[in-house]
Image (cartoon, helix red, strand yellow):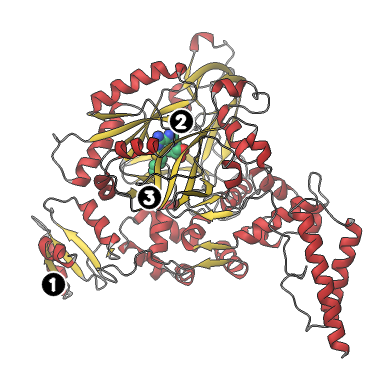
Amino acid sequence: MEKEKIIKDYEKKIKLFDKYNKHYYEKSAPLISDYKFDNLKHQILLLEKKYPYLKSKNSPSITVGFKPSKNFKKVKHKVPMLSLGNAFNQKDLENFEKKIINFLSINKSENIEYSAEPKIDGISASLIYIDGKFTQGLSRGNGVEGEDISENLKTIKDIPKVINAKNFPTEIDVRGEIFIENEDFKLMQENFANPRNAASGSLRQKDPRETSKIPLQFIAYTFGFAKDLKIKTQTEFLENLNLWGFKTNKFNKLIKGIDNLMNNHKYLEEKRNDIKFDVDGIVYKVNDFSLQKRLGFAANAPRWAIAHKFSANSSTSEILNIEIQIGRTGALTPVAKIKPVNIGGVLVSNATLHNEDEIIRKDIRIGDTVKVERAGDVIPHVISVDKSKRKKISKKFNFPKNCPSCGSLTIKDFNETTKKLDAVRRCISEGFKCEKINIEKLKHFVSKEAFNIDGFGKKIVESFWNLGLIKFPQDIFNLNYEKIKNLEGWGNLSVSNLKYAIENSKKISLERFIYSLGIRHIGLENAKLLADHLKSPENFFKLSNKTYINELSIIDGIGETQIKSLGSFFSHQQNIDVLFKLKKVINVTKIQKINSSGKLKDMTFMFTGKLTGISRAEAKSIIEQNSGKIINNVNKKLDYLIIGEKPTTRKVKSAKEFKIKVISQEEWQRMLE
Ligand code: IVH
């Protein structure tokens, strides 16, 4: 009987606690004083300690604060929102087209049609419509996962809320750009550096009524997923967007041939200042959807589209000092601290000098008058020195030969491909021994593409580091929140937000986990290749055994450089310790194959010789789409060697020795029918 009473009393307290907690975190309107709230929490914890049978999912010993309303809910994009490759000149465009022609294995004289669309410098958004109703709107986020900003998006007039058109897909996410016209921006320029920041800030308002006061606009230009879409080209899609009630860009054009793309670029660049909003280039998209589908995606961007940037803005300034920054991989980057100067609406006070060789080549010195360029989201850089303005007393800049952070020796690697020394000098310190490298590793660890911890920015990493709160990645999951609560600028709510964001990040995909470790030469693309091959975190941890690392050479795309770098990472005990400790506090998820039931499931392939009518790249992509795997060399793990014209005899011979099936291109294509 006694027990029943205790349970009842406990449940009553939990219910109250839940109510107060919700009011405090979600509505930012506490119902009781902090003192009473803490007291109640304390009583619950005491009861739980005394009577271990008491349990509730809402107990303060379990809850890490409610989802704070300031943090928007994260939602995975059904189809990732990728970025675009950049082109700066005719040569880049020619290369872009050449790659397309090679991939599709088509005749050079065949003219590819492009939809050329001004690239609006705003914030992209994805609008989900189900049965003609706007149901959810997401920000881009890190491309894989966006934030649910539906309520704010609903305040934008250009976004249709209901679409009744007959041919409107039953399910679609329409994507486009949110922006503010330059005229409207003038009224709010005291608060934001440029229209883009103003649009971004307005979209992230906690209260949609605040967003509604900002004259945000929306121009649509693409889609992520679409059910029952009967449209065959991008231009046709843009026309339909108009019919469905979306605004599109009136400067969109259908163009063939590089010369014509260049002419249109010149025309729009001249017209740029007459356009009512910021445009920073032109996006070219292969117009035919079936070709787009064949071309598919490489790492982070589609093969069928590119952004042709407008030329950068520039200005002159004076170099006040040259500082050496140390990156995550030990690279020493010289940065010029310049007299602040306004370039295209942004106040610039730092400009990169790239590397030691660049300083020597341009003979850049402290005190020099220099031309600084800034293009869109690219880091401002020094392009030239006005030597006529140089003072007599100026001295050549001596690039440090030792790491300014830890004093270790710095070296330039020998590049096996170019057979030259790298232009970049690096600190040779490994693991977590160099303070600056260590801090950069932590910044990388929490960054958007890695653990994606909301609100845990670079400044916080630095401040926590200086306070001795973090040293290794695992420390992030064992923070002393009591201490943080008492720091200047922190309070109950912000600590709770941080706690929530950290808890939320604990579940991470294998590829992002591998990327987060910041291993040199293992960027997003290689991390994905490794994850796809290794499948489970256990297999990744096994790489501390050298034999497993060498086996990675069968992955197409992973070469000697990556293997060497992984080898070096796993040979440092400190890295192994970090992995071991992280393993205990986080949850790395296994790879789930999207299409694991394709016709080539569990089969491995390799090509030798030239294929007919199809490029090697496309053939590879088809195999992967059908759940097959490409491997790099003939060994017992290979199932099929596909031979084209003039195959390498050695490969065919060794395949036969291993009793691997040697098949022709036609036989392979028949497997797909
Ligand atoms: S298509 C995979 N079309 O540019 C194709 N993007 O770097 C992705 N953008 O995040 C987008 N105008 O914010 C496309 N007409 C246009 C665009 C456009 C602006 C932005 C968009 C995207 C970024 C790509």
Q: Earlier in the sequence, mark 2 or mark 1?
A: 2
**In the rendered image, which quarter contains the N terminus?**
bottom right
SS assignment at label 1 = helix
| Residue at the bottom extreme, as displayed | 1
Amino acid on which the number 2 mark rests in the picture: Ile
Amino acid on which the number 1 mark rests in the picture: Lys
Q: Earlier in the sequence, mark 3 or mark 2?
A: 2
Q: Residue at x 39, y 26 (%)?
A: 250
Q: Is mark 2 within 8 Å of ligand 1?
A: yes
Judge whether 1 appears above or below 208 on screen.
Answer: below
Judge whether 225 appears above or below 383 on screen.
Answer: below
Amino acid on which the number 3 mark rests in the picture: Pro
Dot in front, 2 or 1:
2
Q: Earlier in the sequence, mark 3 or mark 1?
A: 3
| Residue at the top extreme, as displayed | 388
Mark 2 lies on residue: 120
Q: Nearer the viewer, residue 358 or 296?
A: 296
Residue 651 visible somewhere in the drawing: no
Which label number is shown at residue 409? none
Mark 1 lies on residue: 656
SS assignment at label 3 = loop
SS assignment at label 2 = strand
Dot in front, 3 or 1:
3
Which label number is shown at residue 169? 3
Q: Residues within 10 Å of mark 2 (few under 14, many from 20)?
A: many
